[in-house]
Image (cartoon, coloured by chain):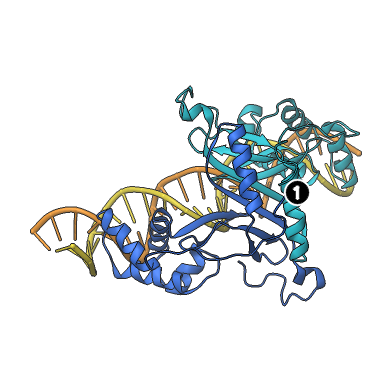
Chain colours: A blue, B cyan, C orange, D yellow
Amino acid sequence: MAAGTDFSLGTVEVALTPQARFEEYLRARGKKITQSRLRIVEHVSRQHDHFDADKLAGELKASKATVYRALGDMVAAGLLRQMEIGRRKVYEHDYGYPQHEHLHCTACDKLIEFSSADLMQIRDAVSRQHQFRPQSHTLIISGICADCRSGRSKSRHQDRV
Amino acid sequence: MAAGTDFSLGTVEVALTPQARFEEYLRARGKKITQSRLRIVEHVSRQHDHFDADKLAGELKASKATVYRALGDMVAAGLLRQMEIGRRKVYEHDYGYPQHEHLHCTACDKLIEFSSADLMQIRDAVSRQHQFRPQSHTLIISGICADCRSGRSKSRHQDRV
DNA sequence: TTGTCTGCAAACACTTTGCACTTTT
DNA sequence: AAAAGTGCAAAGTGTTTGCAGACAA
């Protein structure tokens, strides 16, 4: 590990807002730009946390079917990334954000993001070695976060995500 | 990344066979050493691939309930590790095997294992930086394997794990 | 107007649980 | 004989789908 200890997160330049990018995607696919879809993208874009379909449906008081369908489209459009934490599928922003990894606290379910250039090198080196064409990756380190270690955590199952 | 390119897998010295380790675990918990459980550990120990509950129940013609219960015990006993690949929960050996990561071919669902000392350093460094106590981690690199890239793959959805 | 979307409820796939019976200790 | 395990079927989860009415193009 040469570079060593830079795990900071930055942003990536993007030409369009997530909303605009989504509309572009929908048009390109002959899908319709509906109130429902716009409400969902806007709501999701407004906040930066990880979330799941259920939370979103609750906040928007939209039907789960519609939410699941919209999330699928947003993943396909490259706006969101989906990952599995335990049993849940959680979503996070993927448009305008660099690749990053997660520390997952198994006590309070918090997710802490970090990024590592060294990891990309590992990914490239091992892929080359196996003649594998890498497309994406997920690294989740599970353990106990600082708050939970010190008992400073408000509740053992706080914000869930 | 200093060490660079050693991604080979070895084995780890263990004192007991998986079967013996499991019996020890069961005794320690006041659980019973039943035919059913022994059959399951033996069957699982005999093969080295990744598998899911359904496959196992089918091979053993045991009830799913029993299989799920036994798998839970085996994970608790440290014999198996569970991971989510797409929608499926797959199990792999974790007793006597070193930490390793996976390349997941999204075309044929094959899993290729590798290990990396550098990754452990990243894990340690980032955990220290966040005062996080790491307990385990999962790295899955998704992409297309050599066979599928060259079209040499027998079937697009072969062995599933 | 036409084709797509939405919400609902039903269907699904996977996992867990309640219960009467069986096995281990 | 007591305590725990097993299989079955029923109940849960979380996600997807069929369909009739609603909406965008």
Res. A6 in view: yes
**Residue at 44 percent of width and 70 percent of height:** A45
Left or right? Give the position of A152 relative to A40: right
For the residue pair B74 and B118, the one nearer the viewer reads as B118
Query: Residue A21's spot in the image, x, y percent?
Result: 35, 63
Q: Say above or below: A21 vs D2.
A: below
Query: Residue A53's spot in the image, x, y percent?
Result: 48, 63
Q: Quadrant of residue A112?
A: bottom right
Query: Residue C4's spot in the image, x, y percent?
Result: 25, 56
**Residue at 75 percent of width and 41 percent of height:** B3
Q: Chain of mark 1?
A: B
The amino acid on which the numbered mark 1 sits, given as a three-letter code, is: Met
For the residue pair A142 and A16, the one nearer the viewer reads as A16
Q: Provide the residue designation for mark 1.
A: B120
Left or right? Give the position of A27 relative to B75: left
**Residue at 38 percent of width and 60 percent of height:** A70
Left or right? Give the position of B14 relative to B133: right
Query: Residue B157's spot in the image, x, y percent?
Result: 48, 30
Res. B57 in view: no
Q: Say above or below: D6 vs A27.
A: above
How many numbered discs sit on the rendered protein? Answer: 1
Dot 1, how many residues are within 10 Å of its Cα: few (below 14), some (14-19), or many (20+)? few
